[in-house]
Amino acid sequence: MAKLSFAFLGATKQSKELLLFLIKKNFIPKLIMSIPEKFNISYSDKKVKNMNYANLNEIADKYNIDLVEIDSVDGKKLIDYKKTIKKLDLDLILVMGWYYLIPKSIRKLAKKGAWGFHSSLLPKYAGGAPLTWAIINDEKETGVTFFRFKDGIDNGDIISQKSFKIEYEDTIKEVLKKSTIASKEILSEVFENIENVNFIPQKKGKIKIYPQRKPEDGEIDLKKTASEIYNFIRAQSSPYPGAFIKTADGKKIIIEKAKKK
C-alpha cells in the first residue's frame, strides 16, 4: 500500500475497529475528528445518544494524533477547522461512522476529496439506519458501499461494494459485524491500488432516502404479523435501545430477543 496522508472522521465502534485496522497496516491519520456520545443533530430538538459510540481519545493519545470533537446541528462546525485541515495537506478525508454532512469547502481541502462507507448497497437504503431498515424490511441480503462524497445524502460516486447475507436468526449485532468485515476487505483492496480507483456514478432517481431512527420509534405495533414483529425486534436489539411494548401504566418492556414458531 502506498503512503497516504489523511484525516479520519468517525464516532462508532465500527469506526474504532476500522481505524485500528488501518493503523495496523501503518496508515496513521494526521487528524481524528469525532462526535461526542450525546450530540446535537437536525432531526431532534434535544441531544441524541449514539448507542454505538466509541471513544477514540485512547487511540489518539497512544499514537500522538490530534483529535477534535464536532457537536453541531448540521455539521457545519467542521468549517471552524478549515485552516487546521488545510495545513495538513491531505490526500484524503476518510469518513467511517459519521452523522453529519461534510461541507464541500471541507471536502475540497483533500486532493482526493472525502470517501466513506455506507452500510447498504447504494442506491438502496440511503439515509439513516440502513442496516436496521434492511432487517425490518426482511431483506435477505445487504452490504456496504465505499463512495466519494457529494453534496447530497449518500449520492456520491461508488468506489466499491461488497454484499453479505442476512440470515434468518441474525440480529443487528451480527449484521454490524458482517458490515465491519466487508468494510475491512474493501479498504485493503482499494488502498492497494488507490491511484487507479474507478468512480461509478449512481443513477439519478434510483436513490431512496430512509429517515434516521429514534428510541421512541422502537414501539412494537402488535397489529403487525408475527414475521414483521420478529424482524422489528431483531433489528433493534443490543447494542441498540431495543424494541418495546408499553404497559397500561405507561412503562416500557423492552424485548431483546424473539423466536417465531
Image (cartoon, rainbow, N blue to C red):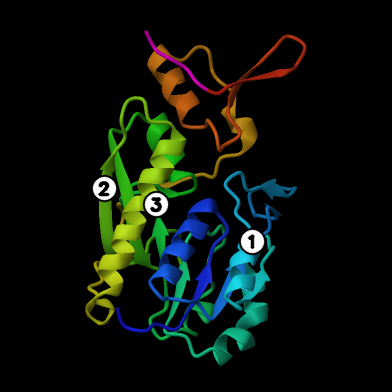
The residue segment tinted magenta is: 257-261
**To which residue does mark 3 refer?**
180
Whichever of callouts 1 and 2 sits on the residue coming sooner in the sequence is: 1
**To which residue does mark 1 refer?**
35
Q: Residues within 10 Å of mark 3 (few under 14, many from 20)?
A: many
The CA distance from mark 2 to mark 3 is 12 Å
* 52 part of magenta stretch: no
Q: Nearer the viewer, residue 36 or 222?
A: 36
Q: Quadrant of residue 187?
A: bottom left
SS majority, magenta = loop
> Which element is circle 3 on?
helix
Amino acid type for the residue under numbered disc 1: Ile
> Which element is circle 2 on?
strand
User: Total of numbered circles in the picture?
Assistant: 3
Q: Quadrant of the N terminus?
A: bottom left
Amino acid type for the residue under numbered disc 3: Thr
Residue 48 picture location, percent across and down: 68, 47
Q: Nearer the viewer, residue 238 or 206?
A: 238
Q: Are marks 3 and 1 in contact (CB under 8 Å)?
A: no
**To which residue does mark 2 refer?**
163
> Which element is circle 1 on?
loop
Quick check: 8 left or right of 260?
Answer: right
* 259 part of magenta stretch: yes
Mark nearer the viewer, 2 or 3 = 3
Whichever of callouts 2 and 3 sits on the residue coming sooner in the sequence is: 2
Mark nearer the viewer, 3 or 1 = 3
Residue 170 picture location, percent across and down: 38, 30
Q: Are marks 2 and 3 in contact (CB under 8 Å)?
A: no
**Res. 24 in view:** yes
Amino acid type for the residue under numbered disc 2: Ser
Whichever of callouts 3 and 1 sits on the residue coming sooner in the sequence is: 1
The CA distance from mark 1 to mark 2 is 28 Å
